[in-house]
Amino acid sequence: MAQKPSIPKGTRDFGPIEMAKRNYIFDTIKQVYALYGFQQIETPAMETLQTLMGKYGEEGDKLLFKVLNSGDYLSKLSDEELAGRNSLRLASKLCEKGLRYDLTVPFARYVVMHRDELQLPFKRYQIQPVWRADRPQKGRYREFFQCDADVVGSDSLLNEVELMQIVDTVFCRFGIRVQIKINNRKILSGIAEVIGEADKIVDITVAIDKLDKIGLDNVNEELRQGGISDEAIEKLQPIISLQGTNEEKLQTIEQVLATSEIGVKGVEETRFILQTLEHIGLQNEIQLDLTLARGLNYYTGAIFEVKALDTPMGSITGGGRYDNLTGIFGMPGLSGVGISFGADRIYDVLNALDLYPKETLNTTQLLFINFGDAETAYCLPILAKARQNGIRTEIFPDAAKMKKQMSYANAKHIPYVALTGENEIKEGKVTLKNMETGEQQLVTPDELIEIICR
């Protein structure tokens, strides 16, 4: 007996209904990106490990899916190397490529390779799958889509403002209430500086970024294990527990960071973004959260994260500014800022809250019942005319029993069925059945089109 097939953990199949929902997500995001002048690109599923490694921090490097070299990849390894079973050393010799971990690093590589072709500032969006060797759990998958928008070649904070408007617009269109969290890596660097641990900025940010997940006590313990002194941890407590309005938090942290030039710069940037957005007006709340750190090492300025308010789920959108990212690929000084919508988590949120518009799930609008060759010959010109008028139409391919054809229509939630027997053909008309109400009416082809297009 053949073994039942399966798919890898952390991946999923998507049937027609699921794909209709996903396309609704992608199309909505694409439409909003286009409103703000973003252009679409795509990059390969695989990148060289030279491109990927060292861009996501130590934890990120461990989650990269590496691809074995083609051919006899063991031939260049010695018996000693194989016997040593050093997985990291072996991987460096066996693998030259990896599946992309996100879309931002490939985008930075793209910008460097195509610099002479680009008009700066370059506003691009990219909707493609990424892969991470993470432990699968609710809302976390090993293969998932990201929907990124980035701007490179501009230092203006108006880019951050527009990205937050995009976030707000997208989730308003979805009907999802969200909270947008904002912070600035310069503020975090200033905090590390004033508590006397400037060289431990990465350890501090990685730890406090986990505050919501593991709690304050565990964060403090992780800070100790990272070599942060008890005195510095004590100074950190009131900062990461800061409460109040956005402006009250800014005023407090501005005083705390008064001696840190980089910290003050971070406060100024954050205040500009928040005040500008307040002037424009967002439908969703935006909150300054000083514990927001985002572990990716390349963020250098504003950082963002979005969470749904009405269902438990991790971050469904995130991003920030990464001024020095392209410098890694030989192009220093090119500023960039971007956001990424987590399409798979948004999919789960829309499912949980039942927010998909009904029309997005209706594929075929009209089904012609097949009564035989003569009836089919009569139907086909009408069917063609319906399609020309934008009606999603099909005809059952076989002259099967009426019950089977109607069951097909019900299973696909087709709202209208057209019946054309001998009497309809004589009159040059069609019997149109509304599958929801059961109402039937004898109509001309033009009347049929008018009814369905209402």
Image (spheres, grey):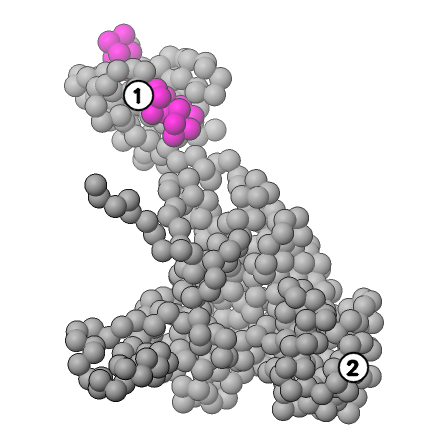
Residue 306: % across, % down: 62, 61
Residue at far top of view: 423
Secondary structure of the residue carrying tag 1 is helix
Mark 1: amino acid:
Gln
Q: Residue at x 38, y 27 (%)?
A: 411
Cβ atoms under marks 2 and 1 closer than 8 Å: no
Position of 209 relative to 30 (above/below): below
Q: CA distance from mark 2 to mark 1?
A: 72 Å
Q: Nearer the viewer, residue 240 or 82?
A: 82
User: Is residue 280 shown to the viewer in this render?
Assistant: no
Secondary structure of the residue carrying tag 2 is helix
User: Is residue 220 shown to the viewer in this render?
Assistant: yes
Residue 58: % across, % down: 49, 79
Q: Viewed as shown, does residue 367 lie left or right of 217?
A: left
Q: Residue at x 70, y 66 (%)?
A: 215
Residue linked to disc 2? 234
Magenta region: 406-425
Mark 2: amino acid:
Glu
Q: Quadrant of the N terminus?
A: top left
Quadrant of the rendered structure where residue 270 is? Answer: bottom right
Q: Nearer the viewer, residue 433 or 401?
A: 401
Residue 53: % across, % down: 41, 80
Q: Viewed as shown, does residue 95 lie left or right of 188?
A: left
Residue 221: % across, % down: 68, 76
Position of 403 relative to 139 (above/below): above
Quadrant of the rendered structure where residue 261 is? Answer: bottom right
Residue linked to disc 1? 405
